[in-house]
Amino acid sequence: MSKRSWPFVLGGLLVALLLAGVVSNYASAHPDGLDSSLLKGCTVNADHEITGGSCPAQQAKDHELTDSPLADYGVRGVGNGFLSTGLSGVLGVLLTFALGGGLFWLARRRGPSTGPANGPTDGPTGPDSDPTADERAARAAGTR
């Protein structure tokens, strides 16, 4: 990576950390489109808990990773909701950046190729590769 692209990458990382760590706390707490469509036919209370009716959301089960450290947009063990959500976002950004950076590092080009792009050539290459008629005659005669 060139020295000119580092400020761009670090600036992008800083913006992503700011969005994930601070702005994510101000996202809407209302159910998104999928959750809303699954709740059609049910009555819900102010805490978005199903209190009656019949809807697909009643068949929902907990995810296998419900007990993971970063489940439900927070960090388990952190009591402050604002801090928990922000920390979860920052950890997610750093993990994603590290994983992506590592993959790009592994896939990077390691320098110029070690041969002609179209395979070997039959004649000389370089400054002497296109001699004039006089030079060709001299080479054929064995003098130069």
Image: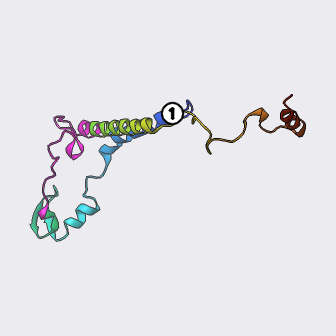
Residue drawn at x 23%, y 37% as measured from the top left = 84
User: Which image quarter holds the C terminus?
Assistant: top right
Residue behind mark 1: 110
Q: What's the residue type where badge 1 is placed?
A: Arg
102 above or below 65? above
Q: Left of 87 or right of it: where is 12?
A: right
Residue drawn at x 34%, y 41% is 20
Which percent across, then down, holds residue 87? 28, 36
Q: Is residue 58 above or below residue 23?
A: below
Q: State whether residue 22 appears in this view.
A: no
Q: Position of residue 133 (x, y in %)?
A: 89, 40
Nearest the camera: 15 or 141? 141
Q: Is residue 92 visible?
A: yes
Q: Which residues lie in the magenta part?
A: 58-86
Is residue 52 covered in magenta? no
Residue 142 in percent (x, y) is at 84, 30
Q: 122 or 104, which is in the foreground?
A: 122
Residue 118: image quadrant is top right
In the image, residue 76 lies at what x, y percent?
Answer: 17, 38
Q: Main secondary structure of the magenta part?
A: loop
Q: Name the residue located 24 percent from the left edge and 45 percent from the top edge.
A: 73
Residue projecting furthest to the right: 134
